Image (tube, rainbow, N blue to C red):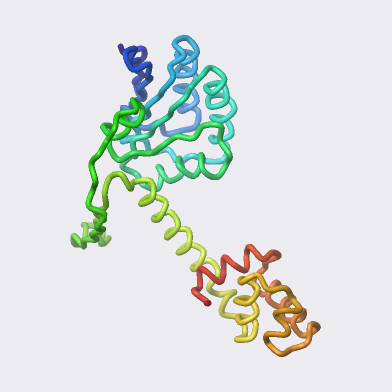
């Protein structure tokens, strides 16, 4: 039963499954438009109180910012949990980076909603309806180069089991994040001396300052001077940031 159909969003209620199904006919282009559609969704959700909801994101292209996240969490997710929502599923959209922003919003911001993400609507429905799936996909990953498009961009296709879609997207996200970090910090990293890099690697392994000094056969005062210089050159303050540099620049 179609409950609502606007220019952007269509909302159906499947009474037999006690499930709302949302399909983005076209993507909202602004936060204002997104809010208008969500307010309608919320009013219907409060009226019907479904236990499950399925978001078909194939056409969704609006990146989820911190502002959008806070509004959705406060006005949609928390009320949804209070009403009784039990399961939320997303079918991944065509724009992978946009969908990563959706995934990160849930993963990194302690949302009260813990959805799963699927490559196909069929897989999402099987999970929502607790249907057993004994299919064992081929775990082999294939990466294919398919040429160059009209703008001169390389086209690379990754073939991986659809059941691994969440891990696949997160892997892409980590690669992009690490690449951006490398490009942004290569200049500062190049300022480090060999000894400073050695100290960073040792710190990343959890050794304390005295232990690091002993391992390098230097005084604690010398080590602290190196650490002061490292922090200044890289503009860092914590061990967490040291570990990020060591991993990104493959210093081990």
- For the image, the number of numbered tags is 0
Q: Is residue 192 visible?
A: yes
Asked whether 249 or 126 is in front, the reply is 126
- Give residue 182's position: percent from left, percent from top: 50, 68
Image-quadrant location for residue 14: top left
Residue under the image location 52 percent in, 41 percent down:
65
Q: Which residue of the protein is positioned furthest toward the right in this rendering?
A: 221
- Give residue 10's position: percent from left, percent from top: 34, 20
Q: Which residue of the protein is positioned furthest toward the top in this rendering?
A: 47
Q: Is residue 147 left or right of residue 72?
A: left
Q: Which residue of the protein is positioned furthest toward the bottom in this rendering?
A: 217
- Give residue 129's position: percent from left, percent from top: 33, 25
Asked whether 125 or 11 is in front, the reply is 125
- Give residue 242's position: percent from left, percent from top: 62, 68
Asked whether 135 or 226 is in front, the reply is 135
Residue under the image location 35 percent in, 15 percent down:
13
Residue under the image location 73 percent in, 83 percent down:
213
Q: Is residue 122 left or right of residue 172?
A: left
Residue under the image location 51 percent in, 64 percent down:
181
Q: Is residue 5 visible?
A: no
Image quarter in which the N terminus is found: top left
């Amino acid at each position: 039963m179609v409950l609502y159909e606007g220019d952007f969003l269509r909302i159906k209620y499947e009474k037999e499954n006690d499930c709302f199904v949302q399909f983005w006919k076209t993507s909202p282009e602004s936060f204002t438009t997104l809010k208008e559609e969500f307010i309608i969704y919320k009013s219907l959700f409060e009226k019907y109180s479904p236990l499950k909801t399925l978001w078909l994101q194939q056409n969704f292209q609006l990146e989820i910012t911190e502002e959008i996240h806070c509004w959705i969490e406060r006005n949609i997710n928390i009320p949804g949990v209070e009403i009784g929502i039990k399961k939320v599923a997303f079918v991944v959209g065509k724009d992978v980076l946009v969908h990563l922003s959706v995934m990160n919003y849930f993963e990194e911001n302690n949302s009260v909603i813990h959805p799963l993400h699927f490559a196909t609507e069929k897989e999402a429905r099987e999970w929502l309806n607790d249907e057993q799936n004994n299919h064992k996909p081929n775990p082999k990953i294939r990466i294919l180069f398919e040429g160059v498009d009209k703008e001169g961009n390389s086209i690379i296709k990754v073939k991986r089991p659809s059941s691994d879609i969440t891990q696949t997207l997160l892997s892409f996200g980590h690669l992009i994040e690490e690449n951006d970090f490398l490009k942004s910090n290569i200049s500062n990293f190049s300022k480090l001396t060999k000894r400073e890099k050695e100290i960073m690697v040792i710190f990343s392994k959890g050794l304390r300052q005295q232990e690091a000094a002993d391992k390098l056969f230097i005084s604690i005062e010398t080590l602290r001077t190196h650490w002061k210089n490292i922090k200044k050159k890289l503009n860092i303050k914590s061990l967490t940031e040291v570990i990020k540099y060591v991993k990104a620049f493959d210093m081990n």
